[in-house]
Image (cartoon, helix red, strand yellow):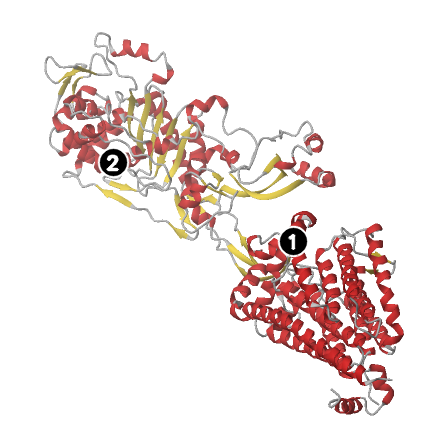
Amino acid sequence: MRTDRDLTNNVNDLRRLKRRSSFLFFFVFLLIVIGLSKIIELTVLDRQEYFTESEKNRIINVPIYPARGLIKLSNGEIIAENIVTHDLLIKKSLVDQSSTEINDLLRILLEPGLEVQSNASQITNSSDELIVISRLSSEQLAKYQINKEKWPFVELKTQLRRFLPHKNVFSHAVGHLGEVTKEDNRQSQGISYRPGSYLGKVGLEKKYESAMRGKGGVSVVEVDVFGNKIREIERILPERPLNIFLSLNLKLQTLARQELSGRKGAIIAIDPNTGFIKALVSSPDYNPNILNKAENGFLYPNEKQKDAPLFNRAISGSYPPASTIKPFLGLLGLEERAIDVTTIIKDEGVFQINDEGRKYRSWKEEGHGEVNLHKAIVESSDVYFYELAFKLTVDKISNFLSLFTFGKNTGIDLINESSSILPDRNWKLGSIGEPWFVGDTVNMGIGQGYITVTPLQLASSVSAIATKGKIFKPKLVERLGDQDIEPELLFSIELNKKENWETIEKSMIAVINSWNGTAHNLYKEGGLKIAGKTGTAQIKSLVDQELTVQEEYEGIREIEKNRDHALFVSYGPLPNPNLTVVVIVENGESGSSIAAPIAMKLMEQYQKEILADV
Amino acid sequence: MSRRAPLDYEINNLLTNNSYSFSRVFKDLPLFVSLCTVLGFGLFMLYSASGQSIGMVSRQLIYIILGLFFMLLVAQLRPESYKNILMNSYWFGLLLLAYVLINPADGYATNRWIDLGFFNFQPSEIIRLLLPLSLVAYLCRRESRPRMSDWFITTIAAFICFYLVSRQPDLGSGLIVFVSGLIPIFLAGLPYRIILGYLVGLAIVAPYVWSNLLLEYQRQRVLTLLNPEADPLGTGWNINQSQTAIGSGGLTGKGYLSGTQSQLDFIPESHSDFIFSVIAEELGLIGILAMFLLYGFIIWRVFRISYQSETNFERITCSSLGFIFLLYILINVLMVIGIIPVVGVPLPLISQGGTSIVVHLLAFGVILSMKKIYR
């Protein structure tokens, strides 16, 4: 039975419970307010931000890289392509732990007879991966696939590498690729290369990098938290890279390389009427496939190291033009009326500005006797051109030669072209710090002293004689993708007297064709009619006035690298020349016996090629 | 109260279609219906959160049916009849806690589970219910008001449970168990001067606990909470992903089964502790508010039963269980939105987990058993 007192107690208890509950509810209310405001902040105020965040979580952009554009000759011959290679990699951090397994792997895969050596030291600089075996042969690949459970720590990486089927033949024209550096990424506007990717470092590979690289596409992929691909949302196809087609001629290039093998030097063969290059060789050369990591082996033989095989002599080598400059000076002499074809100079082997002055000696001790311009070019009289240069003065010479691209970049579609040196008064004051002496002008008359040429520039200059004044920009690429590349006229030289071209050309033809020509050794009855000029560039000055030139040179040639460079410039066949050939053989000593025959062979080969094409 | 009772009776009669036995079985039909709605909603969301796993949903359904069955069974009992059992169930709870500390189940990093072969459960989940119930039963064992010593005994009893659970080690659950024990003590009328004494004591002991008793990862959890963005892939990663899910859902959500954070597994434990993020992402703020309203209705019904009851034991039990239910919801939501540290508390009646569902439904069984039916 309940009493009143119970009832009162009960009411009091209920009141207390409600009071205390309200107290707790107050806290609960506070927490609810905090929670709700946070939820509203998340879902309403910051919604966009979190939505973006959630999209970033689930969507990733996977770049699609197109295979690099191919390099071909115009006849379709492949010069540079992409091949699939397989490398075995291991994380650097795992190398020590798994050294026995690696040894095991090497033992199984590298059985005798397989040529690959362990390149355990070869580290790709982009990551912490170590290449255990690079470029597996198909046999090795099969062995690896069979046993791969044994080596869970080793990763097989398959990728495309640049491969030049002709290896060294096109090395200096095509160039090679290399792994991207920070510097590369800074220079390439807009395109960012992912670490470890390869890009053109030199040659056409670099010059046409953006064309051959194409533009990467993107695959927009939805992923889960583990990075597993759920589906592809969108795909932006990569822009197809362009193939490039070269004007080079395979047989000519191969022949030129073969002729220079074992020597240092450069050969340029160029079509004077268009500027398209038919052969570009610098010797020694290297195997770009090694740098492209498409092949195992040596970049070049060790003993070639001192001859700088990576240096492209054809576009960057600086040589004195020596006697090859004489036709240009002769032309200037005629233009300036300093001489005419009948002007005769008595060549007794020595030229002196005045009686007490220094004796400028001729390569031919006894001199050429009485010489006119024709004989001076054919027999390469030094004294004649000493005197002519002296008469012309450096200002006129420099101005005139610069019309022929002396001292300039030709603008060939390669990188690292050096400009040759065409000295004048200002140049000497600026570069040497001395005023110009008349003696410098005299020296310049035979292409010695400060003046230098690059083989490519010399070829352009000679082409101007062949075309009677037209110089085309030298080009290697004839077609880019579907687009033909047009020849580009750089200069057009107008002479006061057009016959002067013929006068010089006749003399240059006679260099080969007449019995006293310096390159008469090339003459063949019924052979090609070509125009040429030999040159023999001194490296070491002949200073001893007591000894004869011959005697002094005998001492100099004891050291091979002091021997004269052999030069030969030529174009032909006349009357419609289609090829200019410049050959420079370092320390080759004789333009006529070393350089000239090479040029002739190329000339003959090219005519055959043209006939074959037609 | 009594003024509104006849109305309630009429509503009950209306809902139960004048069936006397029907209202007797379900006791409080609106509460029962809203519980079933939340459970159904939970299954619906679990299907999405589990990556559309029928297996997980059916397992959950079995627990729900089991839980509802026991709930209704308990609802039929008279509170007086199990008061003593409840009082002594404290010892059973202690036994379970001691057992997991001594015999850890294999396969778990922490000693939280008891493996019965067919059924694994966490004693800490059970003690959350047993502790408050036993404490209320103890405090209300006499008609008169509790004595001074009773307050200390119950506080110590709660502290022992806290200590054992936090040794598992699971500090978060330990604290929740402790608070679950303190709520009934407070509601039963713990004198304010004792409360003051406790607070002073706590202030003295807390620094020592922080530096000596807490494990490194527990300290880390607390610190992470202070600045989760500082460490996006470390301990704060879960919270960042959870907040991203909730925020990206916006007002109306991304649509059922279309939450990218949930479906692509960016939300950790999306089917259990973090199911709230899935609801928020897929159903948006509106979905969350609807869920809160449903929870609110349940809590209102619980307190209604409490205030209509006639004994202190019934009143305090119902209120305590109501607060504890509320506490769990709050802790889970505040944890998922990143206001409090990550503690292993599922969202009541919705998160996947057998023990949690059954224990919560048993609690509602106790509440229903205290419902006065007017005849």
Residue drawn at point x = 76 percent, y = 50 percent: B109
Q: Are marks 2 and 1 in contact (CB under 8 Å)?
A: no
| Residue B119, percent from left and from top | 85, 61
Location of the C terminus of chain B by quadrant is bottom right
Badge 1 marks a residue whose secondary structure is: helix
Q: Quadrant of residue B276?
A: bottom right
Which chain is home to disc 2?
A
Q: Quadrant of residue A35?
A: bottom right
| Residue A473, percent from left and from top | 31, 42
Q: Nearer the viewer, residue A518 or B239?
A: B239
Q: Quadrant of residue A14?
A: bottom right
| Residue A316, percent from left and from top | 35, 32
Location of the N terminus of chain B by quadrant is bottom right
Q: Left or right: where does residue A440 sit relative to residue B42?
A: left
| Residue that carries the numbered disc 2 in the rendered image | A465
Badge 2 marks a residue whose secondary structure is: helix
Q: Are marks 2 and 1 on the same chain?
A: no
From the viewer's perspective, is residue B115 above or below residue B311? above
Residue drawn at point x = 64 percent, y = 42 percent: A156
**Gap between marks 2 and 1 measured at Cα:** 104 Å
Specify the label residue B204 is tagged with: 1
Q: Nearer the viewer, residue B247 or A478?
A: B247
Kindly identify the amino acid type of the residue bearing the numbered disc 1. Ile
Q: Is residue B58 visible?
A: no
From the viewer's perspective, is residue A591 above or below residue B313? above
| Residue A571, percent from left and from top | 31, 33
For this orientation, the residue located farthest to the front is: A5
Kindly identify the amino acid type of the residue bearing the numbered disc 2. Ile
From the viewer's perspective, is residue B152 above or below residue B309? above
